[in-house]
Image: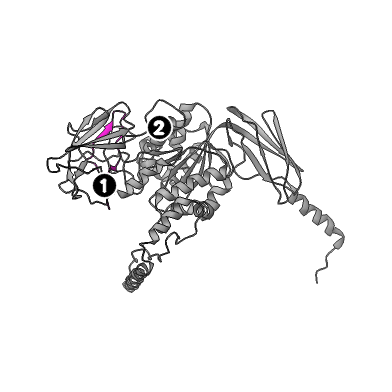
Amino acid sequence: MILMNFRFLPIALLAVSAVQAEVKLPAVISDHMVLQRDVAAPIWGTAAAGEEVSVSVAGQTKSTKADANGKWLVKLDPLAVAEGLSLTVTGTNTIEVKDVLVGDVWLGSGQSNMAGPVRTYKGKDAVLQKLLEGAPYPKLRFKRQGDSKWELATPQTVDAFSALLFPFGVRVQEEIKVPVGLMMGCVGGTPSGFWLTEEMYRSDAACVAQAKEFAKTYDLAAAMKGYERYMAAWKQTQEKAKKDNVQPKGREPRKPTPAGESYGQIGNLYEKYIQPYVPYAIRGVLWDQGEGGTAITGVDQYHVMGALIKGWRGAFGQDFPFIYVQKVSGGGTAWDMSDPVTINASPFAPLPTQLPRNIDGLHREVHIKIQQHPKTAMVIATDLGGMTHPTNKSGYGARAARVALGFVYDKPVEISGPLYAAHQIDGDKVRIKFTHVGKGLAARHSEKLQGFMIAGADKKFQWADAVIDGDSVVVSSAAVPAPKAVRYAWSNVAPWANLFNKDGLPAQTFRTDNWQ
């Protein structure tokens, strides 16, 4: 039998109580951190309920008391750009956070094209390798997801960091000349529906409306029957593979869900990878996701991303810019195939003899539309090289930095290729007007402008003749005397489309109709 000495129990309890009462900070508030300049940056943590906590940095001190749950938060007066600061947090204990910088903080999120580390791509990307060899970068700091602390940008930490976010940060830091902090929250193969909370999704009127509209024509019973047939065939394939002692092929089919519902848990990735950053002050978000869809039946990427962008801004309490990488990646030609940024683009090609299918441009159209949400900009990727995991990560990072510099930092640089704005039908011709014409419209790789198709009331499209006229393109075809609609680059792969602005950025897929 073991006898306990109860005389020492109160002392033990006091020791436990003292440990619980200690002021603690989240992983995102640690040595080498970057605080966002020019805003009331929050600092938060835990302590004993009612405990007095003070935070001191750069000559200012903010004090508060922990609430009934032991949580506390203060907001600093806006800080100017600085290096080598110490931030001291004092309660029953004292924590000194050393080597604090003040500059701009960017959060990178999405799926595998954001998560993929430098070590995976450096052998396929000479510019990325050169950037790695340039480390350390004293004014660039990294924060990987989870419980990791802030890190200096050394060759070792760079090697394990995002191959997209790293070159983005280097380029931005070089241009704005202030410290830059980069935080990651990303998981490969994930849908956008897992990156916003249930409340963000359910409270978004546009998402609710699209789900209701989809439900009117969605036959869940028929989808279930199709699923059961597919599942039976899949099981047979798996059993045969085992019997033949070969590796089974194909993924298990997912059970259909009702309109507006998900096969997984809405918000699970947000809670694990984004919530720990809230409410850290940031300059903006760089997002690379889309291959994984939304995982919400009948609700598309445009609507889910609208709810996500609005929801994240509400959670952080900041109306920050949101920059996202275009999907589908690649598929188009580039202004300059020798430019390291676009070196993996598709070579210019003649028009195919057969037109793309009517649905071929729909996926691109939805993703291009996301930039219509307030304070949101798209990183054009049609000319950056394709595949599921494009290897030219330095090109993607440089293009994303270009968008940030023009869109967020007001640098005099064009951030987009020509975007459809309006059209006017005049007899047998259609005049297409564009925004983002930059230094002017231009046909590239051929004197003839191509990639446009035209149709009349019969909805039968033909390749069209197209001529640049100032900031517009005039489209026509002898085979369509009474045109009703025009489409451009209406395909996931369109190396034959050659409209650019003279700033070197390609025009984006569009259509003037809404035909099914």
Q: Which residue is mark 1?
A: 491
What's drawn in magenta, residue-wise?
Answer: 490-516
* Mark with earlier residue (1, 2): 2
- Can you see residue 336? no
Q: Is residue 278 above or below residue 130?
A: below
* Residue 508 drawn in magenta: yes
Residue at 33% from the left image edge and 64% from the top image edge = 249
Quadrant location of the N terminus in the rendered image: bottom right
| Secondary structure of the residue carrying numbered label 1 | loop
Q: Which mark is residue 464?
A: none
Q: Is residue 129 left or right of residue 45?
A: left
- Can you see residue 85? yes
Q: Is residue 499 above or below residue 387?
A: above
Residue 484: where, in percent of width, then height?
A: 22, 44
Q: Could you say which quadrant of the image residue 102 lies in?
A: top right
Residue 435: where, in percent of width, then height?
A: 33, 33
Q: Amino acid at mark 2?
A: Arg
Q: Which residue is mark 2?
A: 402
